[in-house]
Image (cartoon, coloured by chain):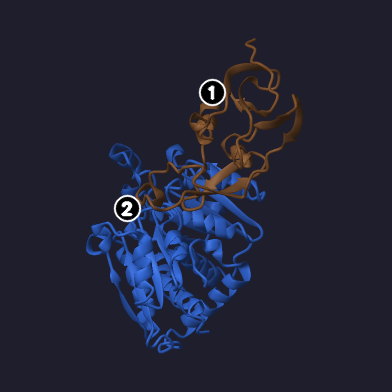
Amino acid sequence: MKHIISPTDLSLSELDELLDLSEEIIEDPSKYSEICHGKKLASLFYEPSTRTRLSFEAAMLNLGGNILGFSSADSSSAAKGESVADTIRVISSYADICAIRHPKEGAPLVASHHSSIPVINAGDGGHNHPTQTFTDLLTIKHLKGRLQELTIGFCGDLKFGRTVHSLITALARYSNIKFILISPKELKIPDYIREEILDAKGISYVEVRGLEEVMSYLDILYMTRVQRERFFNEADYVRLKDTYVLDSRKMTLAKEDMLVLHPLPRVNEISTDVDDDPRAVYFKQAQYGVYVRMALIMKLLKLV
Amino acid sequence: MLNIGVLREGIVIDHIKAGGAMKIYSYLNLENVDNSVAIIKNARSNKMGKKDIIKIEGNLGDINLDVLGVLDHRITINIIEDGVIKVKKNLELPDTVENVLLCKNPRCITSIEQSIPHIFHLTDKDNGMYRCIYCEQEHEKR
């Protein structure tokens, strides 16, 4: 039984296969429209995340399958005190595959220990969000044509931003990747990413405070939102939330073929005047998120 | 320096980080054994400056002393028989430990579900570093 709890649960060759299949879907989104006929995806969302949940559900519907589940802990048996282990034991008999999102880190791993169906981590607190990482990799690969030899800037909340941690970890497996880490000092990447991923693998990176000074070096700019829900202290959130705003003036400093990615939702870290810039690919990225989840569901159900 | 009588038979747990003896005492459940136990705090040490030592008279039975390395990886253990050191035990850090270390990350699933075993993996052998398998939080040694 294969589960996807962390982005590195797929080997590089498995990841290549996943991205190849996703690109097939980009070329012809209706190609696999009946392959999941009679199959059910359980979407177990212990915290609201409309975008990720709908992306998973759209993916299963696009494959001709069905969906069931809940969209917040209040509407699940968790409100009555049921453990993740017991919930997944029961859901395993209702569905063929499940996507689980939980505010606590490690909950999907616990689920996978007790599940008889493939478990996909749809985000566990500030920890992992592998399908977002696969989405990001697909976007870069499809629009840049490669996952090697790139200078990638991460901007904003690099401390709590799990998409950043996961994508750095995933990209660190490719050759000639350089990272530029742009954040206020309070939101710098955690030590374990710096020491165990970047330093341990001898990957080139710099940590800077200002976005404008590094714009011209970037092949990819990955913007993030400062997330209110990750702060225990509201005052810290208010102080830091508007540190970076990408606008059309700053975009003039960037390469002509630089891409701007964002896991969405954005608040005001990307001004709407950037949306029409062809280098702004975050809405396309969200669309690719559905395709990569379609590919993942097919792979985990061993349908391709 | 304080003198404690020489052991004829027993175990000496040496090179415990100063202040850490009670944690080891508690982990080995020494308050509930009949053996004579001496805890020496803040003994002078050339290597460590200060260290704690625990001396236990007699045998503790079948106990996995390697786990003590998880709590403090510099610990050394001498098994004494007939008044001489019979075995100098080098602690082998286990790859995984269950319910030895507790995850203190308030964002970890173990913080809200009591029935989940606290499992840690050894991620850095040289520094004896363990991480929670659920949230990957490093176990902080005092």
Q: Is residue A263 above or below residue A196?
A: below
- In percent of the image, x 69 and y 28: which residue is there? B9
Q: Residue furthest top?
A: B1
Label 1–label 2 contact, CB within 8 A: no
Residue topped by disc 1:
B19
In three-dimensional space, the C-alpha distance between marks 1 and 2, rounded to whole angstroms, equals 50 Å
Where is residue A292 drawn, in percent x and y?
46, 73
Could you say which disc has been placed on residue B123 in the image?
none
A194 or B131, which is in the foreground? Answer: B131
Where is residue A162, by image quadrant? bottom left
Letter of the chain that mark 1 sits on in the rendering: B
Three-letter amino acid code of the residue under disc 2: Asn
**Where does the image place residue A92, in percent across and percent down from the top left?**
39, 73
Foreground of the two, A270 or A248: A270
* Crowding at mark 1 (Cα within 10 Å: few <14, some 14-19, many 20+): some
Q: Residue at x 42, y 48 (%)?
A: A160
Q: Residue B61's image quarter?
A: top right
Q: In the depicted view, which residue is nearer to us: B111 or A209?
A: B111
**Is residue A22 positioned above or below A36 on the image?**
above
Residue A52 figure quarter: bottom left
Label 2: which secondary element: loop
Tell me, by letter, which chain the rendering colours brown.
Answer: B
In the rendered image of the structure, the colour used to display chain A is blue
Q: Residue at x 57, y 24 (%)?
A: B37
